Image: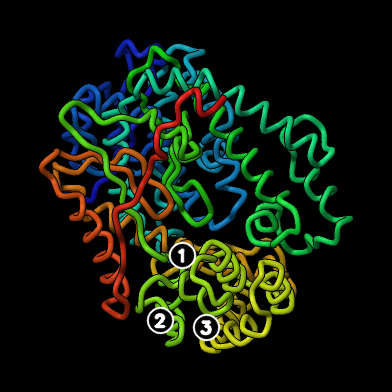
Amino acid sequence: MSNSKKAFLFVRDYSEQGDDLLYILDGSHIEKTSAEKIINEEAELICHDYWLIAPAIYKATKKLPKSITDIEELRISTSGRRIDRESKEKIDISNALSKFADNTIIKNYLAIFNRKKLVDEEVLSAIGTALLSLSEKIEIEAKQQNEWERFVQIERPITEQLITSTSEGIGIDTEQLRLHKKNIDFEYYMALKNFSSKYNMPLEVPTDEAIIKFLEPKGYDFTGVNVDYVLKFVPMQDNFAIDALNLLKISKSRKVLNLIPLSQKRIFPITDIFGSITSRIYYKDPSLQNLAKQHRNIICPDEGKSLSYVDFDQFEAGIMGALSGDTELLELYKIGDLYEAVSDEIFKDKTFRKQAKRLFLSYAYGMKKHSLYDAAANYGADRQLAKEFFNRFSVFEKWKTSIHSEYSANGIIGTSMGNHMRRDRTGALSEQEKRSAVSQVVQGTASLIFKKALLRLRDDSRFEIKVPMHDAVLFQHDDKFDPAIVASNFASAMTEHFQGEITGKASLGNFFQPKIFESQIR
C-alpha cells in the first residue's frame, strides 16, 4: 500500500437521500469523487468526523476505505487528557485547524460542512491542506507518545469492524419494544416515587450533588472518591446505594427505549471507540450498553440467525495478577472462581460472591485497609479473616506503589501499547489520582485485550458483532455455528497478550433476562 496521504472532505446529506458530496485533495488538486472511488483509494485518507460519513459509504458499496485516519480521533486518543474525551462532542475541528488555516477559511468551511453555504472548492482545498499538515503534527506526537502503533494495529481496524457491524444494523423486536415502552414509564415513576418517599428526597433522579448531600451527614467520606465509587463499593446499613443504582439504571433504560421509534425494525448506533479515558467502546444514539437486562430482549437476531453472549471470567482480577506477578493473586485466579474463593475465605460461605467481588475490587483500586475491614464486617464477613486475606498480596501492593511512583514522576501512565492518561496538576498524588492510575493501567489493558479478541474474529463471516460491552459481546451467528468458538478466541486473546504467563478465561453468558410479561411488572 502506498504511504502517500490525501485529504478526504465531505458534505453529509442528512436527509439520507444519497446526495452526500465527497472530495479528495491530492497535492494541490481537489476533485469531486464517489463512494466507489473512495473505497478503492490506495493512499491513506485524512479526514475528520468520519463517523458521520462512514455508514453512507458502506451503504453505497458494502465496503469501507482501505486506510483512513480520523485526525480528531487520533488527536484525542493521543492527548491523554480526560477532558478531551469528555468534551469531544462539544467541540468541532476548528480548534485543531486554527494553527494551519485562516479563521475566515475555517468559518466558511464549517458553514459548508453544515450545509449553510454552497460548496467552495477553494475553501475545501485550503482545509484539506490544513488537515494534511495537522495529520503530520499529530502523527509525530502519536509516535512520541507510543500511541501510533496501537492506533494503526488496533484502533483503526476495530473502527472499521464496528462501523461495518453498526451499518448492517441491529434487529429490533417491535412487540417487545412496544411492551417495554408501555411499561417503562410505570417502572420509572414507581422507582422514583419509592426512592423519593423512602429517603425523603425530591421527586427526581438524584444528582451527584444530591447524593453527596444526603450521605455526607451520615458519615460517608467523599474525599478523593466519586459518587459512583461510593454507591458501588462502600457498604451501607440500608439499601440506599442499591435503590439509587436501580433508579439510575431504569432512568438510563427509559432514555434508550424512548429513542427507538416503534416504526424502526433496525437500529444503527454510532460507534465511539474512545468512549472513555481507558478507551472503552460505547454505542450512542441509542446507547445500547445502558439497557438494563430486563429490557435487552428488544434486540433480536436476523432471520435464520441466533444471538449468543460471551464474556471474560474474572477479567480485571486476572489482568491485575498478570501485570503485578503476584503469585497469591495468580493462584486464586487459576484455581477457579476467584470471587467465590474470596467469599469462602472471609465469609466462610461461597454464596457471598457479589459482596466478595465488591470488596476485592475496592481493595484492588485503593480503598484504605481500615475502611476495607469495616466494609467487610458490615457485609457480615469475619473482620480478622478479611484482614488476613487482604494482607496476603504484598507483591500486588508493591506493583500498585510502582504505578503511583511512575505516574507521580512522569505525569503520565498507560498500558503496553499507549492509551495513556496525563496528569493535569502537580504535587503529591491524591488518593483519587492513585486509584485512577491503577485503573488506567488495568482498564486500559482490559480494553486493549477486548479489542484484540474482537479483531481475531473479524474475518470469520459466521460471526457478527451486535453489542460490545466492557468485557463481553453480544454476537449473531448461523444456527450451526458453535458460539463456544468465540469464548475460546476471547480466552486465547488474553493468554496471547500476556505471552502465556496467564491462561485467559471466557464463557458463554446471559445477555438477556428471562422475558418479563406485563402482569409481572404490574
Per the image, label 1 sits on a secondary structure element best described as loop
Residue depicted at x 48% and y 49%: 75
Residue 396's label in the rendered image is 3
Vertically, is 519 above or below 238? Answer: above
Tell me residue 20's x, y (percent).
33, 17
Cα distance in 3D space between marks 2 and 1: 31 Å
Image quadrant occupied by the C terminus: top right
Cα distance in 3D space between marks 2 and 3: 10 Å
Q: For this rendering, which residue is in front, 266 or 175? A: 175
Q: Quadrant of residue 296?
A: top left
Circles 2 and 1: CB atoms closer than 8 Å: no
Q: For this rendering, which residue is in front, 521 or 213? A: 521
User: Which amino acid lies under the numbered mark 3 shown in the image of this protein?
Assistant: Phe
| Residue tagged 2 | 330
| Residue tagged 1 | 145
User: Which amino acid lies under the numbered mark 1 shown in the image of this protein?
Assistant: Gln
